[in-house]
Amino acid sequence: MAPTDEIIGATAAAANMTEAEERSRPVSNLLFIIAMQAEALPLVTKFQLTEDTDRSIFTKGVPWVRYYGNYKDLQINLVRPGKDPSLGVDNVGTISASLVTYASIQVLKPDLIINAGTSGGFKAKGASVGDVFVATDVAFHDRRIPIPVFDLYGIGARRSFSTPNLVKDLNLKEGKLSTGDSLDMSPHDAAAISANDATVKDMEGAAIAYVADLLSVPAVFVKAVTDIVDGEKPTTEEFVDNLASVTAALDRAVTQVVDYINGKCLSEL
């Protein structure tokens, strides 16, 4: 079956199910949103996914890259925002993440989204390089709108989809995730991250959570720590030094998560 035919079939099936029916049946359509190629490719290999070289499911001209395939009882799509056409670097950050999440949900109709990726961690909150966390909550730390109610909108605090059984059975760590569009951390960001009570910080999570919530798709956030933000080493140096080894740890954790999800409905997670 061609990839486009698979999508049409999944879309038609989803349209004929009520929300209650969707929640009570085993998860079958899993969507990964992953920002960086280095984070995505180990999972592409692990789950033996095929790159969609046609790219016709998305708007013409966008650099987004989709991989697809079947793993056990799951149909898996993995989408990353691709590379900047001019600079050739990964399209990281909230704008690309929100756009690709919206488009992917519209076309692929997932039962569940997993945003997997690397992150900074805070030793004051118990994080160490190589730790993998499942985010309990997500929020922004760089959308400062000091007007009543708008300030809460800017923070955009949301609970992620709760997976208590998954976390317990796989013995995974939990913590709050804070998102901003800068790798470094200004004093303003530091104060906001502290107010968010965050254990880890990234550049995409809260944007993905916003879109997923808007379109009523459950989302799980799995983050592996590459650098200790409140540590002694410069963030950029530590990130580069640890990216390969931490991506391997992320790969192992995500594989455990997918194996656990296989055959279960959302309420069992």
Image (spheres, grey):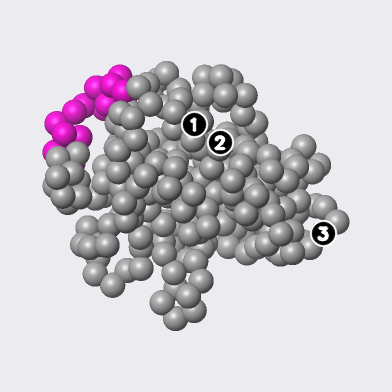
Amino acid type indicated by mark 2:
Ala
How busy is the neighbourhood of tag 2: few (under 14 within 10 Å), some, or many (20 plus)?
many
Distance between mark 2 and mark 3 Cα atoms: 26 Å
Q: Which residue is mark 1?
A: 257
**Local crowd size for mark 3, using a 10 Å CA cut-off: few (<14), some (14–19), many (≥20):** few
Where residue 196 appears, x then y in whole percent? Answer: 66, 44
Left of 178 or right of it: where is 1?
left
Q: Which residues are magenta?
A: 11-26
On whether residue 22 falls in the magenta region, the answer is: yes
Q: Which residue is mark 2?
A: 253
Left or right of 189: which side holds 169? left
Is 59 drawn above or below residue 244 in the view shown?
Answer: below
How far apart are the two marked residues, 1 and 3, measured between alpha carbons? 31 Å
In terms of secondary structure, what is the magenta stretch mainly?
A: helix
Horizontal arrangement in the rendering, residue 115 relative to residue 103 (left or right): right
Q: In the drawing, what numbered circle is on residue 233?
A: 3
Amino acid type, mark 3: Lys
